[in-house]
Every structure is written in C-alpha cells, then in structure tokens.
Amino acid sequence: MQFVPALLLVACLFVGVSVVCLLHERRRSRAEINCLMQQLGAARERGYYARLVADSAYDGLVVQSMDGKILWANPAFCRMTGRTLDYVTGRNPLEFVIPPDLRTDASSIAAFHYDPDDPQYSRPHLRRNCRADGTLFWNEIAVSFRDAPNGERHAILVCRDATDQVERERQLERSTADLATIASCDGLTGIANRSTLMAQAKTALADARAKGTVVGMLHLDLDKFKDINDTHGHSAGDAVLVHVAQILRTSVRRDDLVARIGGDEFVVLCPDIPSLLDLRGIADSLARALAAPAHWGERMLPCRASIGAAISDTSTVTPEDILQRADFALYEVKRSGRGHVATYDEQLHQRHSDRARLSAELLRAVDDGSLSFQFQPMIDLSSGHVRCLETLVRWDHPRLGALKPADFLPLALELGIMAKVDFAAMEAALDLKAHLNRSGQSDVHVALNASSALLSHPDFVARLTYGVLARGIVPEHVEIEVLETVIFDDAAQNSPHARIITDLARAGYQTKLDDFGVGHAGLAHLAQLDISGVKIDRALIRNLPHDPTSSKIVATVIELCADLGVGVVAEGIENPEQTRHLIGLGCPILQGLDLCAPLAPGALLAWLASRQDRPLQTHDPRLLPLRRAAI
C-alpha cells in the first residue's frame, strides 16, 4: 500500500516536469515569433525607405527584364518621359522614348536583349530621347545588372535628364570655337589675321626646308584707300575691304592663304611656289582682278592695289623675313608711283641691305646725338627784319656725307624714332633762342616742326614747357609748325592732335599750319583750330609767277589770312621772280633759298650780326646781298 503513494508521487513529478517543459516550449515559440515580427518590421521599414527614396529621387529609376520590358519605374522616370506607370510597364522604352526619325522597326525592338558583357554598359551613355509631347531631351543612362532571389536577372537603369548640361557644354564649345575664330580671323572680312598668317607661314617654311621648295608672300596695299574713307565714310571703306578679301580668296590657288594684317593691308601666303616668276604671275593676276571697282550702293569705288612679292631662300629663318622682303618690294612700288607689282630680286635685295644698314646707323646717330641742326630765316617784308628761324635737321653721315631731311626722315618715321628726332630739334631750337636772348636779339622767334609722332607723345607739351622755363624763354617766341596734311578727323576740334594744338595755344605758344593749301580741309582747320598762322605750301610757290591758278590761290590765301588776323608765310622761294611776285602780292613774311639758305648756328649768328633791317621792295638791289649771304 505504501507503493501507491510513491507511484502517485512519481506520476505527479512526471506531470509537473511535462507541464514545465510545455510552458518552456511555449515561451520559446513566442520569443521566436517576436524576433520574426521584429525582422519583418525592420524589413517593412527598409522597404518604406527604399520606396521613399525611389519616389523622391530626381533621377529616373527603372527595372527591366533582360528583353528590355519595364517591370517597374519610379515617378521621376514617368515625369521625364511624360508617361504614366501603367503606360510604360510591360513596354520596351525603345518603343516610345526614341525620336521618331531615329526609332528602329518593331522586329528589331522585339529581338532586343541585354548583353551584360557588352562594354557599352560599363559606363554611362548619352541618348537623345523624346517625351510624350514631342519635346526632345538628352538622357544620360547608367545600366547595371542584378539577380533576383529566384535567380532571374534584371537590368537596373538610372536615367538623368542631362539636357541643361549638354546645352552648356555645347554653348561652351561654340564659345570656344567663336573665340578661336576671333583669335585666328579678321573680324571684318572673315579671312585670316596676322597671327594665323605667321603660324601657317612658319609651318610652310618648315615644310619647304624639308622638301627643298620655297614659300612666297604677296604684300598688298590698297591705293588711295584713305580717300575713300574721307570722301564716302568708313562704311564705304569697310565695303571695299570686304570686296577685296572676296576677290583675293577666289583668285588664289587652293592651298594659298589670304590674310588681312591691318588697315588696308593684305598678305597672300603661297606655299610650294616654284619660282619668283611664278609668284609674279599670281601677283599680276590679282592686280588685274582688283582693277574692277567695287559696287557700293549706286557708287563704284576703286580698289586697285600696289603689290610687293618675295620668296624664301636658304637664309630665310622666320616668316617675318619673307614679309619684310615683300614689304620692302611694296615700298618700292609706292615710291615709284603705286598701282603695279614689284618683286624682291637681287637688285632690290642690295637696296634693302643698304637700307637696313642705314637704319642701324640712323638709330645710333639719334641715340648718340650725331644729328645736327640748321636754321632758315623768315624775313618780314615791311621791315626786312628776321622774324623767325625755322629749325631743320641734318645728318652728317660718316660714309655718305651730308644728308638732307628727305633722305632719312621717312626712315626715322618707319623706325618709330621720329619723336626722338623732333625732341632733339626742340632742344637745339631752345638753345639757339636762349643764345639770341643773351646776344640782344630776343625779338627773333624760333620755330620747330612737330610731326604726328611728336604731337602724339604724352610728354611733348610738358618737356617743351620745362625747356622754355629752364632757359627763361617767353612761350610766345616759340612757334610750332604742324603739317596741314596731318590727319584730323571729321570733327577736327575733337581730334587728339587738335587738342594738343589747343593746349599749346593756351600755354602761349604760336602754332602754324605748314604746307597750307594742299590739305583736304585747310579752311576748316582755320575755323576750328587755335592757329596763329599758316605757311603756304612750296608746291604753290613753285609755279609762281607763271601759273595764274597758283598765283590766284596764293593771293586769296594772303587776303583771307589778313582778314582773319592770321599770319601768313610764303616758304620755298627759290628765285628772284618768285620773290618779286610775292612782294607784289603783299605776302608779309618770306622764306626760301632766294633770300637765305639754312645756316648752322655759328654762321647764322654771324649773318644776323652783320646785316641791317630794311624793307623789301620789288626791284630793291638789297635783295641781292640777302640771297648771297648764305653762299
């Protein structure tokens, strides 16, 4: 009987253990369920984030099957293409995003299949796409491939509307191309500019040296082009330049280059030219082509040209060498009357070498003060008194002897040292004036010629004023002679040179227009500029007294200046007949070889000290000693 309680106890223990085990198992399942629920919640959260990103992304996101059909697309792709998700799902984008003129046929689209090994998918590619409304845009597409859990492979597309970026890049390319064109072409005519000419000439020279050939250059300068601008205006001048550029482009060989290097100057580069004779033939044909005038509205404008021709040789190193030779040949054309062709041959080469040597010698002469100065009197008709002394530059060349201004001043102008020459003349004139003041002849003025280079020099007025003050000279006793043919614009009083003349007048200096009567607007200059006097051009004086027209012009100028209260000087008087005629016309001041030649300072001072002032008369024998004084 005692066994039963023990059995019951064991049974109870078994049930208890079973219950404990069951309860433990139930607690374990609930924990797993809780863990699973947490995992599902996290996955749901990640899915939410993924959906949030996909729906909010600016770029289009697309999942495609390997045959190109869209399985899913985000809203950005739908907005980009202008189509709904229902429309795009199940379709290949090739059916609707490719512009109609580029779209392939249905069979090709049906046969489409992605090849993951195709290298084009290793980087983004740009495609021109079309929206539902027909507008075009640039689509930058990046493609990658992923396997789904079921093993199926999908194509994942990231699409970006790159239209703005592409347009900016293309605009940048266009701007770069435009800048390259501006840098390489002449803005008016569209032909090459100087930098392009020199670059291509350098290449042509290198090729010529390698092949044993030569390079030719033609330097063209339009004849009387300034007259076109002055008469018809700059728009007419521009029309002529464009016309000439077109003629040149259509008249040269296929490989020749036409360039405009400034103003009315053109250059034709002729690579692989057989000889100087062949180059001359091209130049002659261009001259004939340019003989026909250009049409401008209802007017016919001349566009004839002077042409210098030159070719390279074994000593030619740079394009500048050929251009310099062509330029020298052009200079010879201008010197001998314009309107034809000159070639740089052996004879011209020798002259060029001589000129280059003379240029170097002139530069040294200006730098070391080797130029000398003479002074020519201007004599008052009524009193015989010397009113003024004009300063004239001379060059006592050690090899060529005494050179006159016409022999070297044009060269000084070309070398860009004309202002230096004028400054040296100014110093010589002021030194002479200071000596005259000390010797009791303070009423004698000095005059100096001011070139365009001097008038344009920023220190001219300041240096003149300093020189005058330093020597104790009265500014009114210093006269500035300006060529009447110095270029003034249409509003002369507003031109830079005119402003300098105004500044000189305000500072007390007298200003005369030199070579008056041959310029294009002499009377206008009298009205507009602060001019104290004029010098009648020697070209008019030369024809006196036998040319009635010249005589009448001179008489009119003398009378007009008297009415205006402007001084007048007749220069270039070379014989007694001219002197008597001008005395008869009542010209107040005379200057020329018939009265006195230019004198060096020492001879001049001795001459001034020995002479007596007496009025000049038509038959006065006292003119004779005046003429002989400088002999």
Image (cartoon, helix red, strand yellow):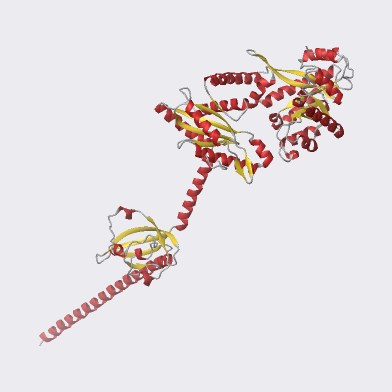
* Quadrant in which the C terminus appears: top right
Residue 458 left/right relative to 248: right
Quadrant of res 153: bottom left
Q: Nearer the viewer, residue 72 or 314?
A: 314
Q: Specify whether residue 607 is in view.
A: yes
Q: Please provide percent x and percent y for residue 392.
A: 74, 20
Residue 266 left/right relative to 536: left
Q: Nearer the viewer, residue 117 or 377?
A: 377
Quadrant of res 426: top right
Q: Please provide percent x and percent y for residue 589.
A: 84, 24
* Quadrant in which the N terminus appears: bottom left
For image coordinates 47% across by 22% down, the residue present is 315
Please tell me how many numbered marks the rendered image carries: 0
Residue 23 left/right relative to 305: left
Q: Nearer the viewer, residue 9 or 472?
A: 472
Q: Please provide percent x and percent y for residue 425.
A: 73, 22
For image coordinates 34% across by 61% down, the residue present is 104
Q: Nearer the viewer, residue 170 or 359?
A: 359
Q: Is residue 45 above or below residue 480?
A: below
Residue 326 left/right relative to 403: left
Q: Specify whether residue 510 is in view.
A: no
